[in-house]
Amino acid sequence: MKLTSHTLNSSIEFIKGVGPQRADLLKKELGIHTFGDALLHFPFRYEDRTTFYKIKDAKDNGVSIQLKGTIFSKELIKGQRSKRIVCILKDSSGFIELVWFKGIQAINAIVQVHKEYVVNGRISVYGGKRTMAHPELELLKEYEAKPGGQFAPVYSSTEKLNNRNLDNRFRRNIVTDILQRLRPSDIPENLPSELLQKYRLVSRYEAIIGIHLPSSQRMMEAARRRIKYEELFYFQLHLAQNKAWRKINFKGHIFGQIGPYFNTFYSTKLPFELTNAQKRVIKEIRRDLKAGKQMNRLLQGDVGSGKTMVALISSLMALDNDFQACVMAPTEILASQHHIAFTEYIEGLGIEVAFLSGSVKGKKRKILLERLAAGEIHILVGTHALIEDPVIFNNLGLAIIDEQHRFGVKQRSKLWSKSKEFPPHILVMTATPIPRTLAMTVYGDLDISVIDELPPGRKPVTTLHKSETYRGKIMEFMREEIKLGRQIYVVYPLIEESETLDLQNLQNGYDRLLEFFPRPDYQISIVHGRMKPKDKDMEMQRFVRGETNIMVATTVIEVGVNVPNASVMIIENAERFGLSQLHQLRGRVGRGAAKSYCILATSFKLSKEAKERIATMVRTNDGFEIAEADMKLRGPGNIDGTQQSGLMDLALVNLAADRDILNAARIDALDLIADDPKLAKPEHRLIMRYSEKLGTRFKAWGKIS
């Protein structure tokens, strides 16, 4: 949302009571420079100021209440180290003490004895006396003269602002002052009348008044609904425009034929029957690759759904059309596993697959780069080393990026410069299931493919929740699995002991496991993020080769380790992990033929949210169901390495709760762009002008995958 007018562009320092110094603090702390900025900092909740309590009925229950009475006395009390100001408020039922430890001079100047006030705050009891610390207070006559209703907005603040008396009441006064100066023409409409009528939306002007000074619950909800729709409509419009613009302007290499590499592999080398989901996705990719437009596709697939096979088959399409392909992964071990898988699958087809990472040095690296530039290497698999300047392809046609959220946007965009004439086709893959609402919002300008079924024969992992009481039984179960030749992961949330968090400690856990599984009968690996990369990789490789029975680790094994023989995942203090992280960890087992288990070990006392997370994990193996549940529990989080607010500037939208508004806004935006891609029609000038005012506020993720 953006507000522009002469009034709204005025500096915030010109509001009564602000001035240059306070204005500077508002700029630094909240980014409020102008009147318009202040209006776009919406309340995050409201206090119902319609109800007054009698002092005798005030209770210490942590809830903010409202009192009305006369200030009976005022006293400035000086202690050895600090001072405080204490006022006694009196009503017909009794007395209560009001106390301030900060902003004492301001309070002393404002509060007048024998005047009637409205007071709002929480009750505390000290030494048998009821007290209200740092309450908001307002002269009764001013309270009764205020415009709007008595739903008091509550704004986010900081300690620095509160210490300078720029508290919630002050912020409300700022906003009220601005709104009193405002005219409807200062906030012109930016949605066409047909959309306003279709959804019965209030005007922008009414929405701004209603969000800050609602006279009723209905007015507040109408304002919030209007603002949410506007935010989502313009964001979806931007995505739709960007996608349409890219399809018009970004031409792509034409992979016109399916040739011997693809056909030979598919008919003689394919190690298993593809799932219907894999076949559908391959058809979608094939359609993109022959269209003459650059493919920019996101491939979502749960852990073990067969994304690697889709990536390989897509690469063979490039090779059949005399192009090279590359696969970039975030870690050396994950890149190495892709390299091994590709090499094994296409053995005997005359395809050269090479591996490049920071550990490939000297003469070996020099020869590899020379062969790549000469076109002798068909598929290059590696880490971010692929995007370094000396890496020159002979004819790159397809770039595949695995776990793409682990790379920065600039890193991914460097792949574009590696291709001649046109940018390479881009396929980005993620094993982190993204809820449909979030995918539509964050990746709405990408084409999205989903592998939503597991290969036949892959057994779901049995997930169990166990408390500390079952520790002995868990150890016995681990012994039985090791006797059967299986391997086990044990994951801890921390490396070192914490004085503030009662967590199982990795080192202590390792020592305890040694008591149950002594050498030389058992071998245990230990891996955590503070180890040197060389030592970490060595320990991981020992486990991969089956030389160790148990891997004790932090979440560094969340992505990148593929050990079909590992059948048990034990997650200590599972209540400390998010749902998506728990699901990713569980995905490390169940990759072989053996029955696999995930044991969620927790403390006895669990919060309501932790219980929901654990119950969800036990109930389902469906990554997309888990992703939806995760978003409902904790919001969209940090998808793509960017917080929701920074990515989309959505001030009020909750993607989990507002999916109906999102769906409506998306359909309206797509219909509009389908009808008028450039918004050139006279009836769309209003929308075009506002869209242009938004400028570069939206990040064009789709252009660079």
Image (cartoon, helix red, strand yellow):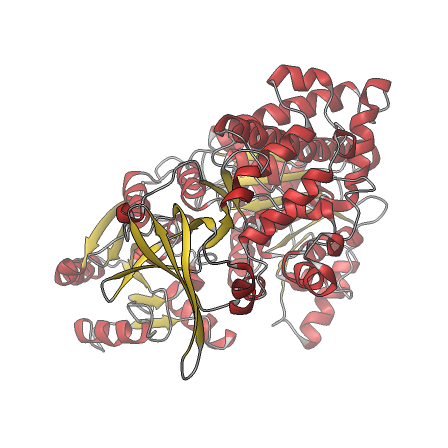
- Rendering coords of residue 77 (x, y %): 42, 74
Give the image quarter of residue 569: bottom left
582 or 72, which is in the foreground?
72
**Residue at screen point 65% across, 54% down:** 352
295 or 94, which is in the foreground?
94
- Rendering coords of residue 60 (x, y %): 28, 53
**Residue at screen point 17% across, 59% down:** 474
Give the image quarter of residue 338: bottom right
Q: From the viewer's perspective, tell me whether residue 657 is left or right of residue 413.
A: left
**Residue at screen point 69% across, 25% down:** 669
Visible in this render: residue 660?
yes
75, above or below 325, in the image: below
420 or 165, which is in the foreground?
165
Q: From the viewer's perspective, tell me whether residue 381 is left or right of residue 251.
A: left
Q: What number of labels is visible?
A: 0
Visible in this render: residue 398?
no
Picture quarter with the C terminus: top right
- Rendering coords of residue 258 (x, y %): 68, 32
493, above or below 559, in the image: below
143, above or below 686, in the image: below
Q: From the viewer's perspective, tell me whether residue 388 is left or right of residue 273.
A: right
